Image: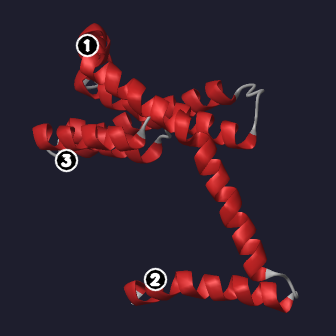
């Protein structure tokens, strides 16, 4: 039943919004066109940032930086019970979710989605944000120049999500 209801939710919302706009005697179509134009302007402004992030992640991956990072942090990872091979995934996730998804598929192929590394990777990918991408894109679009504590808060919440993912995966594999 839920599948059938979900097919009608988006059209129903669209009809409600348009109906509300018309009932308020608003210029619905003109407002839509203005919003679409503003959206296109924002996309045009953030394209350089997106290209820069994609290139940076590609360079780091091709240079072998991530392998060096994994080897360097491996002793710490063993102490924490965190698979060292996931450092790359979570570092890339801070910059690009789509690139991290490709790495997630590599983890699933190598270890399996129900393995301890696979569970951690799946959980953490779902409950963390692409901190640097989000900050650069949204702050650029909104022309924010003083970010104050945004990065510290975002990295702290990502660390909390990662820790929670590790604990949940550990609990799930111990049952």
Query: Relative to 43, is 20 above or below?
Result: below
Mark 2 vs mark 1: which is more N-terminal? 2
In depth, the one of 12 and 160 nearer the eye is 12
The residue that label 1 is drawn on is 74
Left or right: residue 9 versus residue 66 is right
Which corner quadrant of the image does residue 164 belong to?
top left
Q: Name the quarter where the N terminus is drawn.
A: bottom left
- Contact? badges 3 and 2 (CB < 8 Å): no
- Contact? badges 3 and 1 (CB < 8 Å): no
Disc ID at residue 6: 2
Residue 174 seen? no
Display coloring: secondary structure
**Neighbour class for label 3 at 10 Å: few (<14), some, many (≥20)?**
some
Left or right: residue 122 versus residue 8 is left
Across and down, in percent, residue 53 comes to 46, 31
Instruction: Give the alpha-carbon distance from disc 2 to disc 1, as whole Å.
Output: 45 Å
Query: What residue is rendered at 26% in x and 9% in y?
Result: 75
Instruction: Give the alpha-carbon distance from disc 3 to disc 1, as whole Å.
Output: 22 Å
Query: What residue is rendered at 42% in x and 85% in y?
Result: 2
Mark 3 vs mark 2: which is more N-terminal? 2
Query: Relative to 52, is 127 above or below?
Result: below
Mark 3 vs mark 1: which is more N-terminal? 1
Residue 34 seen? yes
The residue that label 3 is drawn on is 113
Label 2 secondary element: helix
Query: What residue is rendered at 31% in x and 44% in y?
Result: 101
In depth, the one of 74 and 57 nearer the eye is 57
Label 1 secondary element: helix
């Amino acid at each position: 039943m839920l599948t059938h209801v979900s097919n009608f939710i988006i059209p129903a919302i669209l009809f409600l919004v348009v109906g509300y706009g018309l009932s308020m005697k608003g210029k619905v179509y003109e407002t839509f066109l203005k919003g679409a134009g503003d959206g296109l302007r924002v996309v045009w402004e953030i394209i350089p940032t997106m290209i820069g992030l994609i290139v940076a992640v590609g360079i780091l991956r091709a240079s072998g930086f991530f392998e060096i990072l994994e080897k360097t942090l491996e002793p710490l990872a063993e102490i924490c019970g965190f698979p060292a091979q996931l450092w790359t995934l979570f570092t890339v996730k801070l910059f690009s979710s789509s690139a991290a998804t490709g790495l997630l598929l590599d983890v699933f192929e190598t270890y399996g989605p129900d393995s301890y590394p696979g569970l951690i990777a799946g959980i953490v990918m779902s409950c963390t944000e692409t901190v640097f991408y989000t900050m650069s894109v949204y702050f650029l679009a909104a022309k924010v120049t003083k970010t104050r504590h945004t990065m510290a808060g975002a990295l702290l919440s990502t660390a909390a999500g990662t820790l929670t993912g590790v604990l949940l995966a550990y609990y799930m594999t111990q049952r």
